[in-house]
Amino acid sequence: MAKLILSMDGLVLKEIPLSKERTTIGRKPHNDIQIDNLAISGEHAVIVTILSDSFLEDLDSTNGTFVNGQSVKKHFLQNGDVIELGKYRLKYINEVVQQAGGADFEKTMVLRPDMMRKTVEQMPHKGFGDTQVGVKEAAEAMLPEQAPSPAPASVPSPAVAPPTAPALPLGSIQVLTGGNAGKELELTKTLTTLGKPGVQVAVIARRPHGYFITHVEGAQFPIVNGNTLDAQAHPLADHDIIELAGVKMEFFLKA
């Protein structure tokens, strides 16, 4: 589990595990990490943690949020990053080892028409207008294990293993409004980021028991089936209608 180490003038004050999906930082008492100092805004910043990844967002604070000496509005935290809030320091520790080229979450990028690649089904994966799409091409399907050779007739057949739980169907998003209406995006990765930078960003996570959408950035929260979500992860059901950054899209499961 990732954690933060709070210090001031080189003196370690506290160690905070990032056990929540949304960890707020600020001067007011309701924050998860309260720093009672006038240089810190009442609601200064927030850290959204999804699986092993954490995102830092400045909440329009008066004095700003800095990471490794650079002013940031939104930042994808990496092991060893130091968040600077006035005289206070929050060191981000995440010792999860990422194999080279093996991360499930491709850092957010904006896809342009000249960058498009076709999927196996020749479906173009375009961004939703200026929509961010954190997704790579689908990986090749793994070959099933070779079945064992049948036992000789004189040898009793081994016990049949109980059937395994059915695999989670592949989820997809289809754009319903805007210039890219009708386009489809398969959710092949563990994390897929959707939205417009500086306006509204959300992440759809593929978990063993289903797909979940979580708010990451922006004053407005995503809307699902006409209901505005809160800061917690929300499970998606087949044919849910999502409204994000002015675009309506339908989530559905492929058979």
Image (cartoon, rainbow, N blue to C red):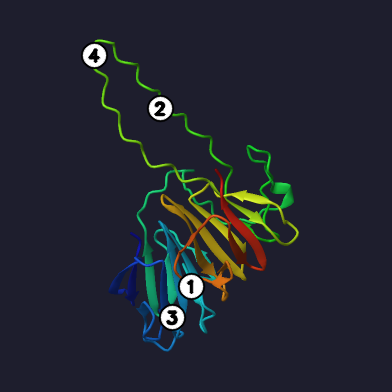
In the picture, residue 94 is in which quadrant? bottom left
Q: Secondary structure at mark 1?
A: loop
Residue at the limit of the structure toward the right, as seen here = 179
Q: Position of residue 106 (x, y in %)?
A: 53, 51
The residue labelled by disc 4 is 155
Disc number lying in front (4 or 3)? 4
At label 2, the amino acid type is: Glu
Determine which of the numbered discs, if any, sits on residue 86 in the image: 3
Determine which of the numbered discs, if any, sits on residue 145 in the image: 2
Sequence-wise first label, 3 or 2: 3
Question: Would you place residue 203 above or below residue 23 in this image?
Answer: above
At label 1, the amino acid type is: Asp
Q: Along the line of sight, which residue is nearer the eye, 159 or 9?
A: 159
Kindly check if marks 2 and 1 are in contact, taking CB atoms under 8 A apart as contact: no
Label 2 to label 4, Cα distance in Å?
23 Å
Question: Would you place residue 3 above or below residue 12 in this image?
Answer: above
Label 2 to label 1, Cα distance in Å?
43 Å
Label 4 to label 3, Cα distance in Å?
75 Å
Q: Position of residue 247 (x, y in %)?
A: 67, 64
Determine which of the numbered discs, if any, sits on residue 141 in the image: none
Sequence-wise first label, 4 or 3: 3
Give the quarter of the figure containing the N terminus.
bottom left
Q: How busy is the neighbourhood of tag 4: few (under 14 within 10 Å), some, or many (20 plus)?
A: few
At label 3, the amino acid type is: Gly
Kindly check if marks 3 and 1 are in contact, taking CB atoms under 8 A apart as contact: no
Sequence-wise first label, 2 or 1: 2
Determine which of the numbered discs, if any, sits on residue 230 in the image: 1
Answer with left or right where residue 159 lies relative to residue 118: left
Label 4 to label 1, Cα distance in Å?
60 Å
Residue at the limit of the structure toward the bottom, as seen here = 38
Residue at x 36%, y 38% (from the top left corner): 164
At label 4, the amino acid type is: Val
